[in-house]
Amino acid sequence: MIKKLYLIVLTLSSLSILQAQNYSISSPDGKAVFQLYCTPSTLSYSLSWEKESIADKSEIQFFQTSSYKVLGKESKKINASWKPVWGQSSTVEDRCNELTLHLAINNIKTDLICRVYDDGIGIRFAVAGQNNLKGKKIDFRLDLNTASSAKAYHIKGQNVLGPLAINELFSGEGKKTKIQPLVLEYHEGRHVSLLESDLYTAKLFRTAIIAKPSTASLSLQSPLVSLTNDNGFVSPWKVILFEKTVGDLVTNNVPINLAAPCKLKNTQWIKAGKGLWDWRVHGYDNGDFKYGIDTKSYLRYIDFCSEYNIDYFTIDDHWFKSAKDGKMDISPEVDIKKVMDYAKSKNVKIILYYDRKKGNYGDDKLFAFYRSLASVGMKYGFMGNNTAFTRNAIDEAAKENLLIFFHDGPVPMTGVYRTMPNMVSREYCHGQQDGRRAFTPSTFIKMALVNAISGPLDQSNGNFGINSINSGIREKGPRKTNSYNATVVSEVARTLVIFSGLVTLPDAPEEYRKKSDLFQFLKEMPATWDESKVIQSKMGEYIATARRSGDTWFVGTVNNENKKTLDLALDFLDSKKKYEATIFEDAADAHGLENPEVYKIKKQKVNAKTSIKASMAVGGGHAMIIKALR
């Protein structure tokens, strides 16, 4: 009897081992450990970093009501590098360890691909074409069971809310879902972000959201997909980033490494750059000339771009009155051919606005029409979080060699600027001078540390005429006077802090000419970089970003509503070289609301051992151009 009982226990124990199959994969540096657990009815994981838990055992789901069977596995190391067309770095290192688990999920052959980097993980499913797919429902969900002590920051509309306890994220009235990316701030030295990448390639899927499941702290969920055929497909990557500082999340390369390589054979026509924008200047009167939506105004912008080596000029809404059936009714005040011809003669590239609120030109004809006007790009507004439309617009624009960027709550489409680098920016944030409750010095910093994790942003920083903006005389200025809190030096720094393939400058040419010595920073600053790093950051309080082009470093620091001084170590400089820094700083009596346009400029010899004291006013900032001495 005892022998029989022993055999039964041994058999049950063996079955349990067979039923619960565990797999482990570590990052190249060995500090991050990803554990995958598969039973006949569940698929789950855990994640630790530097021996501390980021995710306790948490569920992964792909098909609804799933059963699982492991068919095999493969492991490999990835150690490569690639060069983006434009970006925060001229070369991107791609080092990770990959585990592919071959599964039968509900008898559907499916690959689960897991990549573990030193600073993040990515999880994706790939399904080959097979006979039993049609009619199946995809419910892709990555849960995250994490410490309740973490403080969360999330995007609401185009604002950032937080810090919130995790159990406060979904409490109270309103939506029970949040927009990604989500940032979790633990004790000092650990920051985590939850988002997705390569949605562009995952053609069946729409933007994932952050939700509250019944079994975990929170979850990154893709909207339900019903398969209509037996063709194969891939999912987006569900991504977890982890860094010691919140600023490092912004320059983390895991999301773009997970995105598909560039699809375009010829990218010579794609150039990141800076551009003027007319929208916020409407009604500006310099005493001799008043800017409006007309040919004369556009020619003045073009002259300034040509004089100061500004690559682009974006013409916003109302240059046309309506669009329908392949025809466009141009505003009578605008001679669009004259504007385009003049821009060409001055070597300035024109980007034209379009939105469907004025009718439907027809997307099958629209992009070719814009190219026929000699536009080099399109600013598309008011299509919002429409994933299929956004993919198609990027593709159709590329066919006509057009740049494109999206406004008004667009799809995040993280990583797409690697795959389709003609998508240069998007207003996945709050633009300057919009809602004051969303655009304050502290919320700027939150957007720079949360929204920017998803990729390039179009935030329209760089106002120089802050007094006239705050006076209410601008047609498109803030509705409430004296509510725009920023110094001119802060405005300069913000153009560097916010990464974009199109750095949009929103002020009148006259305001830039008045402060031409300060504008020199913007004139010299490129829009694509050899190296980028956030050297100091604290959520809602300050951010200091350094970017290198060749031997020259540009540094921008932005402050919140409390006057402060930061010690900025220049240890990122080459220790074998000497440099000269041109330093742009708030004047002693500067104040973002009371005295925003006073500044001073000085030069100083520096090296890698130098520490610069960045004294910043309320709503203030600090900027430097650091050039290597020959």
Image: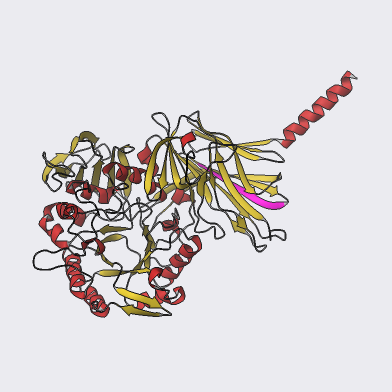
Residue 383 location in percent, x, y? 43, 63
Residue 585 location in percent, x, y? 15, 43
The residue shown at (85%, 25%) is: 7
Q: Of residues 327 and 133, which is closer to you in this image? A: 327
Farthest residue toward the top?
Answer: 2
Q: Of residues 467 and 113, which is closer to you in this image? A: 467
Q: Is residue 35 visible?
A: no
Magenta-colored span: 108-116
Farthest residue toward the left?
Answer: 287
Q: Image check: 221 left or right of 438?
A: right
Farthest residue toward the front?
Answer: 173
Q: Is residue 202 visible?
A: yes
**Looking at the image, residue 597 lies above or below residue 331:** above
The quadrant holding residue 586 is: top left
The quadrant holding residue 21 is: top right
**Looking at the image, residue 527 lies above or below residue 36:** below
Q: Image check: 89 left or right of 552?
A: right
Q: Of residues 374 and 157, which is closer to you in this image? A: 157
Residue 495 location in percent, x, y? 26, 51
Q: Of residues 226 and 378, which is closer to you in this image? A: 226
- Tell me the chief SS of the magenta region: strand
The residue shown at (18%, 46%) is: 487
User: Is 114 inside the magenta-drawn segment?
Assistant: yes
User: Is 389 inside the magenta-drawn segment?
Assistant: no
The residue shown at (43%, 74%) is: 360
Quarter of the picture holding the N terminus: top right
- Count numbered badges in the picture: 0
Q: How is the image coloured?
A: secondary structure
Residue 323 location in percent, x, y? 38, 76
